[in-house]
Image: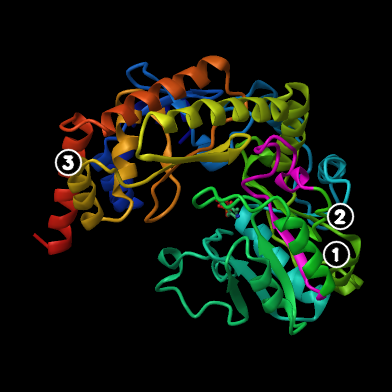
Amino acid sequence: MTFDLGTELADRAGESFSLHEKYLNPAMVRMLKTIGFDRTYVRAQGQYLFDVNGERYLDLLSGFGVFAVGRSHPVIKKALRDVLDADLPNLVQLDVSLLAGLLAERLLSHMPGQEKVFFCNSGTEAVEAAIKMARAATGRNKLIFCDHAFHGLTMGALSLNGDHSFRDGFGPLLADSVRVPFNDLPALEAALAAGDVAAFFVEPIQGKGVHLPSSTYLAEAARLCRTHGALFVADEIQTGIGRTGKFLATDHAANVDPDLVLVAKALSGGYVPVGAVAGKRWIFDKLFNRMDRAVVHGSTFGKNNLAMAAGLATLAVLEDEGLIANARLRGESLLRRLGALKSKYEMLADVRGQGLMLALEFGPPKSLALRAAWSLLEKATKGLFCQTVIIPLFTRHRILSQVAGHEMYVIKLLPPLCLTQADEDWIVRAFDDVIADCHRMPSSIWDLATTLAGNTLKRKAGT
Ligand SMILES: Cc1ncc(COP(=O)(O)O)c(C=O)c1O
């Protein structure tokens, strides 16, 4: 029997939801159908998705940040085809590949403070590697993480997760992990004081909720870590590779020189799973300290040729197309224009972010009619209001966005960095229209909200 991908896709077109329902995750299918996101996408280009009816969608999710250079990028595709056509020896394992060396060199050229790189296959693997490196380098066990932190969902990374909805039911997690409030230096200092901490893991901007620290927090936190002999680990898995308008989000602050920097997501242009830990030579030397420990940490597919070539192409595209500067300028403009809506709409409480990692936060209305409807939603599920905003953004305006975390009133925008002026206008127009509707009663949004709340309350009551 021969395999032909085109025939396979054509023969089984339209079966994705039934296959997922049967073999993968029926809860996901139910959720998509409930909120009306069950489209059949057939093509993707740059910041756009196209469905089977030819409708174009603006993707403000970019696959949770992996398509920073845009989908179906010709330079990345060519690099991948070239690797395959070259029939290079891949994953020889008892060998070292040129492509991995080249990507390490190019990645480090964007991080002047770092000297070495370890490659793996995902963000969470980078976190796991950093946990082991920190323990090996310091000889200590304890790890500090922040409230609301997200570092991935494998057991080590989950031990550093600051949200009970991810942790509950999976314990016991790593015993020596300690939570501190984000952006709270005295709490961090108290946790470090005993001198038994291996590392402090922190996102420069927290992905869940898009929380930015004060301008001095990261530099001070790094200084405190150094004073107390702990490593300062910057998790730039979401914020790195240009997302915030600099190569790393920690580059915005002066005097932040992390011991380890974690990147993943956008590094391979979205095509191939990848992750990387960049860091100081002395830390790597403690882990790979003898010939018999040359493979003490690693992963079979780490450094594979496809990921490495895609990484090289991605870094070239970022530079050639000026995408980091575009992220900075578009982000500033969106922040200003969306922020201006606050004076028009009482429920729009905050607009924040950096570069193209942005958030709109909503809060309770003052008017009596709206308050009653808001309270009903609250009773059903905390944070349900934001679902009622992202649904019309999608169905009416063809904008794909997400709620920024559980039980939150925050909508997050994480678009490809190639966003244009026309896209920016599309976003502002859509939010203006949908938020205006939220402030009208009755309106189609509150009708939808009432239905969603009713369904949720019925489900909770088991009817
Ligand atoms: C800051 C941060 N760290 C770690 C991860 C985990 O990455 P992955 O999903 O590739 O395991 C994520 C993913 O969203 C993230 O945003």
Q: Is residue 203 visible?
A: yes
Amino acid marked by disc 1: Phe
In the image, residue 232 lies in the stretch drawn in magenta = yes
Under circle 3, the secondary element is: helix
Structural crowding at the residue carrying mark 2, measured as other residues with C-alpha within 10 Å and reported as few (<14), some (14–19) or many (≥20)? some
**Residue highlighted by disc 3:** 369
Which residue appears at 15% of the width and 43% of the height? 451
Query: Given contact means CB atoms under 8 Å apart, are the residues at marks 1 and 2 in contact?
Result: yes
Under circle 1, the secondary element is: helix
Alpha carbons under labels 3 and 1: distance apart: 61 Å
Give left or right: position of 28 versus 70. Answer: left
Q: Which residues are magenta?
A: 228-253
Which quadrant is the C terminus positioned in?
bottom left
Amino acid marked by disc 2: Lys
Give left or right: position of 42 versus 366. Answer: right
Residue nearest the observer in this picture, 93 or 241: 241
Amino acid marked by disc 3: Ala
Query: Mark 3 or 1 closer to N-term?
Result: 1
**Residue highlighted by disc 1:** 284
Q: Position of residue 413 (x, y in %)?
A: 50, 36
Query: Given contact means CB atoms under 8 Å apart, are the residues at marks 3 and 1 in contact?
Result: no
- Predominant SS along the magenta part: loop
**Residue highlighted by disc 2:** 116
Under circle 2, the secondary element is: strand
Quadrant of the image occupied by residue 74: top right
Most distant residue in the left direction:
463
Which residue appears at 73% of the width and 70% of the height? 199
Structural crowding at the residue carrying mark 3, measured as other residues with C-alpha within 10 Å and reported as few (<14), some (14–19) or many (≥20)? few
Query: Mark 1 or 2 closer to N-term?
Result: 2
